[in-house]
Image (cartoon, grey):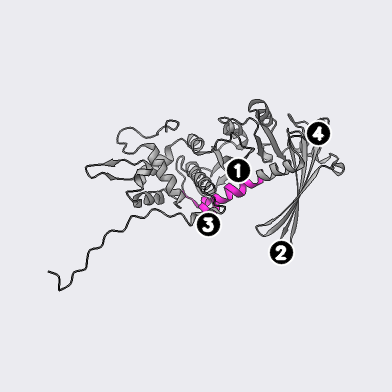
């Protein structure tokens, strides 16, 4: 693992970095939510499992000793979080879309430090590309380019919520990364939002309807798309604009909510039909359901009290790896799949025959 430097001092180092991280990753996959739980999983792992983690044998009997809880904890709070996230993530090359969104790990808040806010990039297939922690005195906007910089995004459409609908982001994606964008527009860009609202949407015939039912609600989405190259919208490389009207009905209460969302993209009408634009917008909304919501419900991330050093972001990276691993194995429900994963059990010890009065 040459791409990830070992943060520990060479003196007294018993385990290499790779086996330590593999042990932690398997423990999180098996349900560990804290450093102590990771250490307990490692301590109870049988001898026949340890070689597969790269843990070497010691002594004349060839006994393999897993990393201790203190070793696992020290590595997870010290190892470079950006390098670990890039190493364990899935390269976006060949992906159709990459969605960018942030989430706060509420349990990592301390008396002196704000909770860790993590900005992540997820491919259209639901695999985590990378993530990084947003510095406490700034916000997601300043970290957008740094998050995507290491990756080849040529031909990939990057989607993001309204916070990232920035002119610099659009220029960076198109001019520096040879990528495309679809960015949502809300009140944080008042002039652009007002210009989009004033477009002749009633005259647009290029539209798409989608209906879904799930999570206790029915949802209908109407997507209208309009070419705006001649309308002088003040946004770099914009070619099309979209108006997405969402109707949601709560199945239990019957309450109906309505939301209108606007979006801009550099994709032409030949590259993105109303159906394609609707899919791109949907892929941005699903990052919350496929990553952040899963980490909180299946791994209790908001309840985690890991706060020291790089612990919050590195544990989130291991949770991302667990989610991706279970999805690749064909599991649709991560919570249900984790119920099938158990810590390895040592083989039963042979029992001794019971002694009785007839035995010598």
Asked if residue 295 lies in the magenta stretch, the reply is yes
| Residue that numbered label 2 is attached to | 253
* Distance of label 2 from label 3 (alpha carbons): 28 Å
CA gap, disc 4 and disc 1: 30 Å
Q: Is residue 123 left or right of residue 196?
A: left
Q: Which mark is residue 125?
A: 1
Name which of mark 4 and mark 1 comes first in the sequence: 1
Secondary structure beneath disc 2? loop
Q: Residues within 10 Å of mark 3 (few under 14, many from 20)?
A: few
Quadrant of the image occupied by residue 59:
top left
Q: Residue at x 73, y 44 (%)?
A: 278
Magenta-span inclusion, residue 288: yes
Picture layout, residue 171 above or below residue 226 = above
Characterize the magenta stretch by its predominant secondary structure: helix
Answer with left or right where residue 120 lies relative to residue 40.
right
- Does 67 sit above or below residue 349? above
Instruction: Measure the C-alpha gap from mark 3 to mark 4.
Output: 46 Å
Asked whether residue 186 is in view, the answer is no
Q: Which of the marked residues, 4 or 2, is nearer the chain's N terminus?
A: 4
- Magenta-highlighted residues: 284-305
Q: Residue at x 64, y 34 (%)?
A: 156
Which residue is disc 4 drawn over? 228
Mark 2 or mark 3, earlier in chain: 2
The residue nearer to you, when weighing 286 against 68, is: 286
């Amino acid at each position: 693992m040459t791409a990830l430097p070992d943060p520990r001092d060479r003196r007294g180092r018993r385990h290499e970095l790779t086996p330590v991280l593999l042990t932690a990753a398997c423990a999180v996959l098996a349900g560990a939510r804290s450093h102590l739980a990771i250490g307990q999983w490692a301590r109870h792992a049988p001898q026949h499992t340890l070689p597969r983690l790269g843990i070497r044998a010691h002594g004349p009997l060839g006994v393999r000793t897993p990393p201790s809880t203190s070793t696992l904890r020290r590595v997870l709070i010290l190892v470079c979080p950006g390098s670990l996230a890039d190493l364990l993530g899935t390269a976006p090359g060949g992906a159709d879309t990459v969605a960018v969104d942030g989430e706060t790990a509420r349990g990592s808040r301390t008396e002196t430090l704000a909770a860790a806010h993590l900005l992540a990039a997820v491919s259209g297939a639901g695999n985590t590309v990378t993530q990084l922690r947003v510095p406490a005195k700034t916000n997601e906007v300043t970290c957008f380019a740094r998050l995507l910089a290491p990756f080849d995004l040529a031909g990939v459409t990057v989607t993001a919520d309204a916070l990232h609908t920035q002119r610099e982001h659009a220029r960076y994606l198109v001019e520096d990364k040879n990528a495309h964008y679809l960015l949502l527009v809300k009140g944080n860009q008042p002039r652009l939002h007002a210009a989009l609202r004033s477009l002749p949407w009633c005259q647009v015939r290029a539209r798409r309807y989608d209906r879904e039912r799930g999570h206790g609600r029915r949802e209908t989405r109407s997507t209208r798309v309009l070419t705006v190259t001649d309308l002088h919208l003040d946004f770099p490389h914009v070619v099309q604009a979209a108006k997405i009207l969402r109707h949601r009905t709560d199945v239990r209460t019957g309450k109906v909510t309505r939301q209108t969302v606007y979006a801009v993209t550099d994709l032409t009408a030949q590259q993105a039909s109303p159906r394609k634009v609707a899919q791109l917008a949907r892929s941005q909304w699903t990052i919350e359901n496929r990553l952040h919501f899963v980490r909180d419900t299946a791994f209790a991330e908001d309840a985690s009290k890991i706060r020291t050093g790089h612990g919050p972001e590195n544990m989130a990276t291991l949770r991302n790896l667990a989610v991706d691993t279970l999805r690749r194995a064909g599991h649709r429900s991560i919570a249900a799949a984790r119920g099938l994963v158990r810590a390895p059990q040592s083989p039963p010890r042979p029992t001794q025959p019971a002694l009785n009065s007839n035995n010598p």
